[in-house]
Image: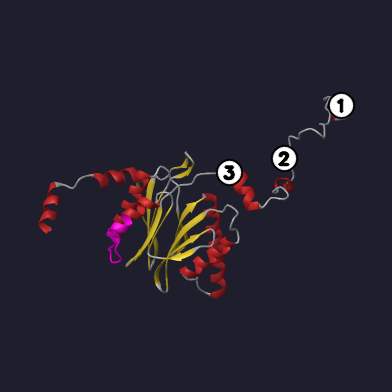
Amino acid sequence: MALQDVCDWQAPDAQGPSPHLPQAGGWAVPRGWDPPAFLRAHGPQLAHGTTTLAFRFRHGVIAAADTRSSCGGYVACPASRKVIPVHQHLLGTTSGTSADCATWYRVLGRELRLRALREGRLPSVAGAAKLLSTLMARYRGLDLCVATALCGWDRSGPALFYVYSDGTRLQGDIFSVGSGSPYAYGVLDSGYRYDMTSPEAYALARRAVAHATRRDAYSGGSVDLFHVRESGWACVSRGDACVLYAELREPPEAGEEEASEAGS
């Protein structure tokens, strides 16, 4: 006797709704729809927010970022890493969709290693930025969201490039990306100098990110600080953003005020 006879089981109606997932082809964009237009009309609308910055100065490149990963009003992770190392002399800040950023940095690292095997040396920072922008430009209009600042040191010295997922590639001395970038730019523009010392650069980066996390609801957590030198990149510190902001708000002591007045 068959098992279905014992259990009094009957086959489900083929015309009714099936509890099983459709075949792979069932997830395709409906016929007659343009994929970018379909994603804009029916895709998920998720709010992204972060504060990342990078600037070039006499002693290398500074990269700093907050650590809050959020999706709208939901904080998914308060201690994520938004500064991703690529190789010993190159790292990048990440802003946008976390999955997209992580995926494309893995792709970039793989392509750079393959080029190093073929050519016997790693590409320059400009070459890495051009490679990343070319790879992502093929997916323009498909809701890819990656905005990064590539920070590195090559044969020409410290270099900084901004790359966006639509293929945009810019070279500069200061970049800040994310919803908190207007607040960070305000601090950077008032305190940036190319001939800064390393401690001055560290203090400026921490101050910019801490002020941005105070004003921007999507930024927060801690402040990661990295320094790219000729010898390679190094993680300088990770400090709580609220503690850093409270330290910045503390008035100077009486002795420090008298010293500053005497110096002026």
Name the residue tied to disc 2: 21
Q: Amino acid at mark 2?
A: Leu
**Disc 3 target residue:** 44
Residue 233: image location, x then y, percent: 40, 62
- In this view, the residue in front, 212 or 158, is 212
Q: Residue 5 has which mark? A: 1
User: Which residue shows up at 40% across the image and 42% down it?
Assistant: 217
CA distance separating discs 2 and 1: 27 Å
Secondary structure found at label 2: loop
Whichever of labels 3 and 1 marks the residue nearer the N terminus, that label is 1
Q: How far is the residue under mark 2 from the one under mark 3?
A: 20 Å
* Badge 1 element: helix
Question: Does label 2 or label 1 sit earlier along the sequence?
Answer: 1
Residue at (35, 50) in percent of width and height: 183
Residue 115 image-quadrant placement: bottom right
Query: Disc 3 residue type?
Result: Pro
Residue 237 visible in this rendered orientation of the protein: no
Read off the magenta span: 187-200
**Occupied quadrant, residue 58:** bottom left
**Are the residues flagged by discs 3 and 1 in contact, CB closer than 8 Å?**
no
